[in-house]
Every structure is written in C-alpha cells, then in structure tokens.
Image (cartoon, rainbow, N blue to C red):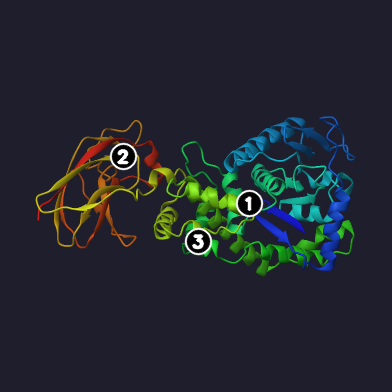
C-alpha cells in the first residue's frame, strides 16, 4: 500500500492520497517500480555531500534529513534549515521526535533528473503536474526503530516542501495521519503557522476561497466525503494511459484532464481551505486546543476516538465560534484574542441594581455578566480611555468620528447574536429580547491586536 502526499504546483493547497489495493494493475506495476527503482536510501556513512549519477544532483545532510537535490549549495543548505525548523515545530506539537533520517528529494528543475537519480517516470509525472509525493517504505523491525521509512519528493517551492515534511514526519514516526480534513488541514496549518501572537497569515487566495461560497459547518468538514479520492482517480486514469515509455508518462496527465477535472480541483481547493481553517481555529483557541491535541494523537495512533466524542459537551459553542471566525477572518486575525469566554457567570439584574466590569480594547466580545430581559431598560456609563493603534489618540468609549473605538455590544441567545448595539460612553436601551450581553471595543477584527487600554463599564437596570 503506497501513501501519496501531494501539493499542487502554483497553488497553496496540498492533498494526500492513500493509494488502495483496488488500483488498476498498470498503476500497481508503476508503484511497485517506484520502490524497486528507488531502492534503499543511501547508507548512513556516506559523505555529507557527493555527486549523484547526474552531475547536477548532490546530497546534503542535516540532523534529520538526507537531501538529494539539484539546488545550488547555498539554496540547498538554506532549504535544510527551513525543513529542520518545520520538523521541530511538528515534533514539538505532537510531542514525539522523528524516528530516523528522512530521505528528501527536492527538485528544482525536472530536466536535471531521470530514473537514474531515483526518480522514476510515474514520480516525475506527479511532481510535474501535482507538486509533491511521500512514499512509505516498510523496514525490518530488527534494523530500524520505526515501522516504515518516508521517501519524500517535492518541487523546490518552500510551502510544498514544508507540507511534505509534515507528511513525512507522520509517515515515518507514527505510520498514520487521520482523516483527510485533519492530515491535510494540519499540514497546511504548519505551512502557514502563525507568528507568536497567533495572527492569521496565509495567501489571500485561501481567504478568498473561504469567503466565496456558503460557509461550511464543522459537521460539513469533518463528515464530508474524501476530497483526495477524486485526485487519486485522476492519477489512476492518467496511469492507465502510459505504456512504459518515459515520455508517454510525462505526457499522460494533460490528455486525461478536462473541465470535469477542473471542477474537481476547484472543490478540492476549497476543501483544503476549510480544513486549514478548522485546524487553525482549534489549534489556537484555548477553549478547545487541549482536546484537539488529544484527538490528533488518537488519529496518529490509529485509535478509535472521534471528533464527536471529544467535543460532545460543547459542540454548539464550538460551532458558534467557528462560524464567527469564518465570517470575520482576515490577515492578522487572532483566534486567541477573539475567543468567547464561556465560563463567565451571568446574573439577571433587578431594577435599581448595577454591575461594573473592565473591558479590554485588545480583545473580542467580552462577557459583561449581565443577562438582559425583554422589555428591561438598562443604562450604560464608562470611565477611562483606550487606543486602537499604537500611536493613536486616547479615545473614550464614544470612539472617533468613524466609530472606531466605540463601545459596542451584542446579545447572545441560543448561540445567536443580535445586530450590533452601539453603546458609546453613556447610553440607555430597552432590550427587545432576553440574552447575555457581550461588549467590545469596536475595531476591525484583524486589527484588535495592537489596541491598548481599557474602560470601566457600569451597567444599571433602570426598570
């Protein structure tokens, strides 16, 4: 059984195909040829750099990788640094060091490579048209401390290489990766790992894909059909066209590609975006990230724990927050600052009673602790100032003339929120329905991280 992890050339998204035993005979022959042609990885005691059978292919070593590439030496060594950095991130997150050395073939120009360089025609086809592939090679237990070795192939684009590093790590360290949404979502999340503050930073086409059509539910993502199987079928169809000649292999995929494949690719692209969004959200939201890690370990160990089991008690809360994340996502958005604080106690104020709380400028909606009742009249008064940019003016809760920095609120009921209430420094309102009042400093969701200061909000029920 061969496991392919693929990244589209010229695109941000990657896919992972599990090639099943039901493959057509011709493809099984080609896949068998991959293992035979590649042979065993180079011996451990070979020099750190040597010439391959093709003069432009050289081998470089690092702590965890043996890199075969046609890149220049400076670029190759820079690539190794980036690969080690990616590996360190995933090993830290999954709390398991990689087992053994990963053999990586990084291709800058396919014209420099041939089957003599451990790059058989079928692999060349996939690299030319898809971008990356990771192949597990079973190893005798007596010889290796791990079940299988990962042979990783990728074009030299950094995001493709990082994606394949994640797959190679999982392949060689655990042997399992979980369902499509998790293995591909996590691989892309690592590729687009946010900075220390957790800000969204991804290609704009990812955000465009998330916002171009109907917003999917969590259930749509985790229980949706496989989005890598159609890619598997395309490769299988392309393989059926080859006759064993290297040139015919390279030419096979274009003749097997048409409008149906374009539509399949569009849907797969969107599925990658959805999977990345869910993994990014769960990885960085403290309401869920510990259990998400637990779920991931279960996937990697091929255990039976499911998403529905792990998040059964607060699935509605998770869905609510995820939908708001998709609606407001932008470059710079921080899941950690925008998470909802579900553990805050709420009370119903009797007429004449009041509560006072501090509202931070650098946060999303914050619980006031006040449950409003339909028809109740409430007054609001704030003291203090805040800033909505590092060099900006100190503003009271009325904000500036654009409305930025104004105190705003929503009423939450049954995991739905009302339209935004503009409360300002001092105001009154009559509640049109019951619910929990949450407030924030009005600012673009992608820009609240650089806000500073707080105001003291007093809420009084008048009648």
Q: Quadrant of the N terminus?
A: bottom right
Give the left or right position of residue 94, taking residue 405 as reference. Answer: right
Which residue was labeled with disc 2?
A: 361
Say if 103 sits above or below 81 in the image: below
Give residue 108's position: percent from left, percent from top.
Answer: 76, 42
Q: Which residue is mark 1?
A: 300
Disc assigned to residue 408: none
Crowding at mark 2 (Cα within 10 Å: few <14, some 14-19, many 20+): many
Mark 3 packing: few (<14 Cα in 10 Å), some, or many (20+)? few
Could you say which disc has been placed on residue 308 in the image?
3
Q: Earlier in the sequence, mark 1 or mark 2?
A: 1
Q: Secondary structure at mark 3?
A: helix
In the structure shown, which secondary structural element does the residue marked by tag 1 occupy? helix
- Badge 1: few (under 14), some or many (20 or more) residues near its Cα, within 10 Å? some
Residue at image coords 89%, 61%: 244
Residue 443, by quadrant, is top left
**C-alpha distance separating marks 1 and 2:** 40 Å
In this rendered view, identify the residue nearer to me: 417 or 122: 417
Q: Is residue 93 above or below residue 184?
A: above
The residue closer to the viewer here, 356 or 446, is 356
Q: Is disc 2 placed on a helix, strand or loop? A: loop
């Amino acid at each position: 059984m061969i496991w392919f992890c693929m990244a589209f050339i010229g695109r941000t998204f990657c896919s992972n195909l599990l090639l099943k035993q039901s493959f057509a005979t011709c493809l099984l022959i080609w896949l068998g040829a991959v293992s035979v042609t590649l042979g065993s990885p180079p011996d451990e005691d070979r020099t750190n750099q040597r010439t391959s059978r093709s003069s432009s292919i050289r081998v470089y070593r690092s702590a965890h990788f043996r890199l075969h590439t046609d890149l220049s030496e400076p670029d190759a060594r820079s690539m190794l640094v980036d690969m080690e950095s990616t590996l360190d991130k995933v090993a830290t997150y999954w709390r398991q060091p990689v087992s053994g050395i990963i053999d990586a073939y990084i291709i800058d120009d396919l014209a420099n490579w041939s089957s003599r360089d451990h790059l058989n025609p079928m692999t060349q086809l996939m690299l030319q048209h898809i971008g990356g592939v990771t192949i597990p090679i079973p190893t005798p237990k007596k010889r290796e401390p791990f079940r299988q070795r990962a042979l990783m192939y990728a074009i030299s684009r950094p995001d493709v290489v990082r994606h394949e590093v994640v797959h190679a790590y999982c392949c060689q360290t655990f042997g399992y990766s979980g369902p499509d949404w998790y293995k591909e979502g996590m691989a892309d999340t690592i590729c687009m790992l946010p900075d220390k503050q957790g800000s969204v930073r991804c290609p704009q086409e990812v955000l465009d894909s998330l916002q171009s059509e109907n917003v999917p539910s969590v259930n749509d993502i985790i229980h949706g059909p496989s989005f890598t199987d159609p890619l598997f079928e395309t490769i299988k169809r392309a393989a059926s066209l080859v006759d064993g000649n290297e040139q015919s292999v390279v030419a096979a995929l274009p003749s097997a590609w048409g409008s149906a494949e374009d539509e399949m690719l569009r849907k797969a692209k969107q599925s990658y975006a959805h999977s990345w969004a869910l993994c990014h959200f769960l990885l960085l939201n403290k309401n869920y990230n510990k259990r998400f890690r637990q779920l991931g370990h279960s996937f990697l160990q091929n255990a039976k724990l499911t998403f529905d089991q792990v998040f059964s008690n607060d699935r509605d809360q998770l869905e609510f927050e995820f939908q708001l994340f998709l609606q407001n996502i932008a470059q710079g958005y921080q899941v950690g600052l925008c998470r909802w604080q579900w553990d805050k106690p709420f009370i119903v104020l009797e007429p004449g009673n009041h509560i006072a709380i501090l509202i931070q400028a650098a946060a999303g909606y914050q619980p006031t602790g006040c449950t409003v009742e339909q028809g109740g009249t409430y007054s609001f008064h704030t003291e203090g100032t805040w800033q909505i940019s590092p060099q900006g003016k100190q503003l009271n809760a009325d904000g500036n003339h654009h409305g930025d920095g104004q105190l705003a609120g929503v009423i939450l009921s049954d995991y739905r929120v009302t339209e935004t209430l503009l409360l300002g420094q001092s105001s009154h309102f009559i509640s049109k329905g019951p619910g929990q009042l949450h407030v924030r400093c009005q600012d673009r969701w992608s820009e609240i991280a650089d806000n500073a200061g707080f105001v003291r909000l007093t809420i009084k029920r008048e009648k």
